[in-house]
Amino acid sequence: MRDRMERRLSYLISGETFAIIMFPIIYAVSFFAYQDLKLHFLFSFWLSFFLLEFILLQGSLYWRVKLKQLKKEPSIILPQRVVRTLQVLEKANGGLLLLTLLFFVIDFLIWYPNVPFKELSITGYIFIFAFLEYVNYFYIQLSYDNISDLKFLIKTRRLKEAYIKKDIRRGSSR
């Protein structure tokens, strides 16, 4: 069981880390391949992109801490300082989401009536992806990519509580 959990945590770490590395590369390639796209002019694009990368980094680091804890201790209950950090990050992410929405509106108003629809659409998709990652980590698990998760989903017909949310609740009650 412990081996399986270590493999699962390593898989999650590598997936998040891969995404963190690949998204800037994809942006760089698309910057040169699609020079008519002017994403770099939109502050909301940069905020959305930063937010997505920031949340993915948090996920990667969270899984690393869980793996380290699993290797060190018989349980994976997080230290109090990590729980407090997660609480701060949850609030910071929420603030960044609101700030990004504000700048999305500002970008729209700045560019009106010549609104760059493609650029704002891409920015919107990145923002939605960041928002879904935030929900997936801090509220409700949205990713069901293994048999155990799928069995739970089929059996209970409900979504699981996010792992970080569980750890925050557990840590707050100590």
Image (cartoon, grey):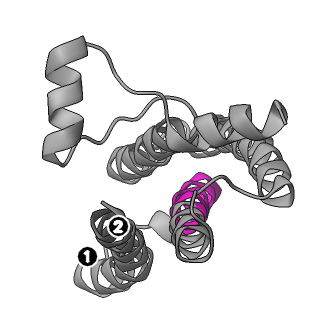
The residue most toward the top is: 157
Label drawn at residue 34: 1
159 over 169 or under it: above or below: above
Residue at x-position 37% and y-position 71%: 6
Residue at x-position 46% and y-position 43%: 114
The quadrant in which residue 72 appears is: bottom right
Q: Which residue is mark 2?
A: 37
Q: How many marks?
A: 2
For the C terminus, the quadrant is top right
Q: Taking 66 as reference, is 173 left or right? A: right
Q: Which residues are magenta?
A: 42-58
Nearest the viewer among 43 and 173 is 173
Residue 140: percent from left, percent from top: 46, 29
Residue 4: percent from left, percent from top: 27, 65
20 over 124 or under it: above or below: below
User: Main SS of the magenta segment?
Assistant: helix
> Crowdedness of circle 1 by 10 Å Cα count: few (<14), some, many (20+)?
few
Residue 70: percent from left, percent from top: 53, 68
